[in-house]
Image (cartoon, helix red, strand yellow):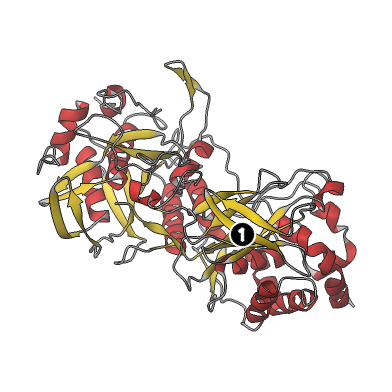
Amino acid sequence: MIRTAFRTRLPALLPLLLLGASHAQQSAPATMVARTAGVYPAAAAPGETAWIFGLNGVPAEGKLSVGGQTTGYRIDRPSGWLAFQVPQAAAGGPQALTLRGAPQNLRLNVLTVPPGTDALVYVRPDAAKTVQAEYTRRLRALSETCAKSCPAEVQTVLKSLGAQPSPVLTPITSPVKGQGVTPGLAARITVTPTVRAPLINLNTLKATNLTQLLNPAARPAAAPTDSICSALAGTVPTAGLPLGQVLTLLELIFAGDLQTDPVRVGWPNQAKEPPHAKTPPATVLGRLLNFKGGSGKGVTIHVLDTASATEDPFTYSGQYYNVPFTDRPHHGRAIGEIAQAVAPGAAVQYRQVCAKDGTCSTLTTVQALCAVATEARRGGRHVVNLSVGGPNPTRGLELALREIAALGVPTAASYGNRDDCARLIAGDRCNHYPADWTRTFEFGPAVNLASRSLRPTMLLSVAGWDIAGGQLATYNRGVGNPGLLSEAPSVQAPGEFWLGGYPYFGTSFAAPVVSGVLANWMSCQPGVPLLPLITTPGQPPLAPNVVNACP
């Protein structure tokens, strides 16, 4: 009887459920939810089909834009949804969907992952048994419900997922007891974990008014989720299915108990004579920033990158100014060496989250950040360097970064390089995460500086400063790409250095300068410094009182 209720109610409720699972928070009154347009799935890769539902009065066929890219759409029968194919050249990450007659807040997360990328799921510990016991039953029930009312592509995905066993779940980290945070270092920022939505299970489907349940303004306050570090994780093979649909459908049937990400989080960022050729980083920084030498004693800099404690298999070939190079070794190791040149007394701990080919694991990155959180709870002072990233906002990464920020651990993240925006056109948004979350990690009272009101942040987005021209470097994301949309960085730092006879340049290598500056500051000062974005040509990008904070 319960199962029958589940099937009979879902045809009318599917648009509502998808709306609730689409990452966008709706605050309209309950009576308006059914008439609010939404996007399914919440994420899709170029070449995949996506839909807009809840629109009335638009032509049966026409054109819409994904960012700056135009594509055709058509009305799908019998669902009535507007089906469109994500353009092959669509920019990665959240992109605006523009269509006459549609709301202006429609967004699609364009996935930039290789075909066959699997889904990563995070499950609340108290919901693990429910997920594993009901995984197949819910998928099959939704498949039967959708047989006559959903687009054929959605039915295919549901049938294929329903034929798979439930994912094997293992803890992200072991439980940690005790709080040992160094006094005075914890940042007073608001940790905003994902809110646990009302459970979409067979009992509540039978007993609850779902229109009210899905309306954030009407439902009672929900308890926050547990820490991401206490969650269980598992992998769901996509088996050639559209990854975005897999992610969205799994969140739909386990609302609030299960969250998803792609298994890959991103990658490492990368006519005249080169400036300061083969000069040690500390010497270059002394010339450019009047850097007098630092310490960083008592601080650990955690480099989450391509290097482990014993190896760094990553190699790269390219050209720096007019100097070509082949198989330049390392990425993470170079970042650690730059950070230690700024803060020679700091301990550098390498955590390998990226493979030899430069692909970085979402789960491994989350686990590494949770390991940093464990160390921070035991005591000491810590800084994280993340010179990796990509255009897609991954939930596990954001939640893990908030976990360490609340423990007083700042993160220096690379802003992203110009090649991240290659082949994009005007109207596209060039995204790069985690750097683009920097303003949501601000805390404390505002400080008035040069007629600007600024607040410190626990997540710094570090752009590269041209050591030859004394201004924002041309290799930065969005520079020289007119019409592209992107978030501004929060700070600049020199990003061109020579190590072992090889050039290292890009925002990847600007971030560890800031990591080292943070370590120096934290070795003798409380909290984290305010690091404003200084853009005056010829003026050093970092203030002397911050660069040389310790006696």
Viewed as shown, does residue 221 lie left or right of 428? right
Give the image location of residue 225, x and y in percent: 64, 54
Viewed as shown, does residue 142 lie left or right of 399? right
Give the image location of residue 403, x and y in percent: 51, 48
Give the image location of residue 23, x and y in percent: 64, 53
Q: Quadrant of residue 494?
A: top left
Asked if 529 appears above or below 511 in the picture, the reply is above
x 31%, y 44%: residue: 507
Residue at the outermost top position: 451
How many other residues sit within 10 Å of disc 1, few (<14), some (14-19) or many (≥20)? some
x 15%, y 60%: residue: 326
Quadrant where the N terminus is found in the figure = bottom right
Give the image location of residue 247, x and y in percent: 60, 65
Can residue 492 be seen? yes
Residue, disc 1: 72
The residue lying toward the viewer, choosing from 435 and 275, is 275
Tally of marks: 1
Can residue 227 be seen? no
The residue lying toward the viewer, choosing from 58 and 385, is 58
Quadrant where the C terminus is found in the figure = top left
The residue lying toward the viewer, choosing from 407 and 122, is 122
Viewed as shown, does residue 336 lie left or right of 273? right
x 74%, y 55%: residue: 59
Residue at the outermost bottom position: 163
Amino acid type indicated by mark 1: Gly
Q: Secondary structure at mark 1?
A: strand
Asked if 539 appears above or below 109 in the picture, the reply is above
